[in-house]
Image (cartoon, helix red, strand yellow):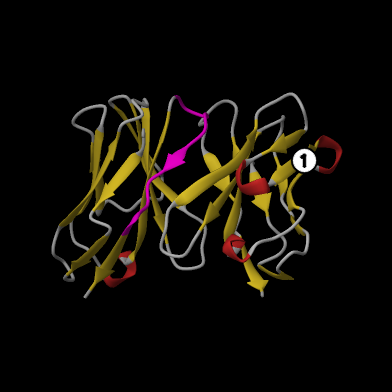
Amino acid sequence: DAMVIQNPRYQVTQFGKPVTLSCSQTLNHNVMYWYQQKSSQAPKLLFHYYDKDFNNEADTPDNFQSRRPNTSFCFLDIRSPGLGDAAMYLCATSRDPGKTQYFGPGTRLLVL
Amino acid sequence: AQSVTQPDIHITVSEGASLELRCNYSYGATPYLFWYVQSPGQGLQLLLKYFSGDTLVQGIKGFEAEFKRSQSSFNLRKPSVHWSDAAEYFCAVGATSGTYKYIFGTGTRLKVLA
């Protein structure tokens, strides 16, 4: 089945230690998104790629970076995680901007 | 600016009872409208979507939603709730031009009593 896959499902890191979260998709969609979701809150868009074009949200901290080496994969890099970065990180894809977004299962990040 | 309001933070219903979750939006034109469900520790699953056409939209798991332009609403309904429907429900508005971003509501947490 075509799908959005996120690895790992759970990630524990130390304060200030860089961490990378992975997302892959078999839908061949043009757009890939990264959201941050804290407990009992709505998902918050961090950035998205439309093909190779990177689009950063204005309020996304510089601590968060992303890479999309090819259509199928997208990575979220957190350069120096702080305690406030502990959250669920959701990857989503859509065929084109504005079209239906399909979400992966998420990666829960814990910062010690 | 776009906005989405889900007035009910928590809703509790008995199993077998009917359900309606409210969603109101603010947008300059007819937006794309979505309902997603999220079980604890999971990602978001698409229940249904509205782009245009018939204002009553059928989704998965027995859910439906009705787009009412005059009320700027897109309420989610289910005639008979099952215990497995307990989850968080998010309404989202998608811009049809410009940034094409989703705006999510704050979510409604559904509890189902046996």
Residue B78 position, x and y percent, is: 73, 52
Residue B23 position, x and y percent, is: 71, 51
Task: Give yes or no for residue A101 being in the magenta stretch.
Answer: yes
Residue A47 position, x and y percent, is: 37, 42
Picture layout, residue B111 above or below residue B51 = below
Q: Which residue is mark 1?
A: B66
Residue B73 position, x and y percent, is: 77, 45
State the residue at coordinates (61%, 66%).
B83
State the residue at coordinates (74%, 51%).
B77
Given the current orientation, which residue lies at the most extreme left position? Answer: A17
Which stretch appears magenta? A96-107
State the residue at coordinates (28%, 64%).
A109
Picture layout, residue A92 above or below residue B42 = above
The answer to whether residue A51 is left or right of residue B16 is: left
Tell me the quadrant of the picture where the N terminus of chain B can be found.
top right
Q: Quarter-wise, where is residue B13 in the image? A: bottom right
**Front residue (pair A39, B78):** B78
The answer to whether residue B99 is left or right of residue A27 is: right
The chief SS type of the magenta part is loop
Q: Chain of mark 1?
A: B
The answer to whether residue B104 is left or right of residue A90 is: right
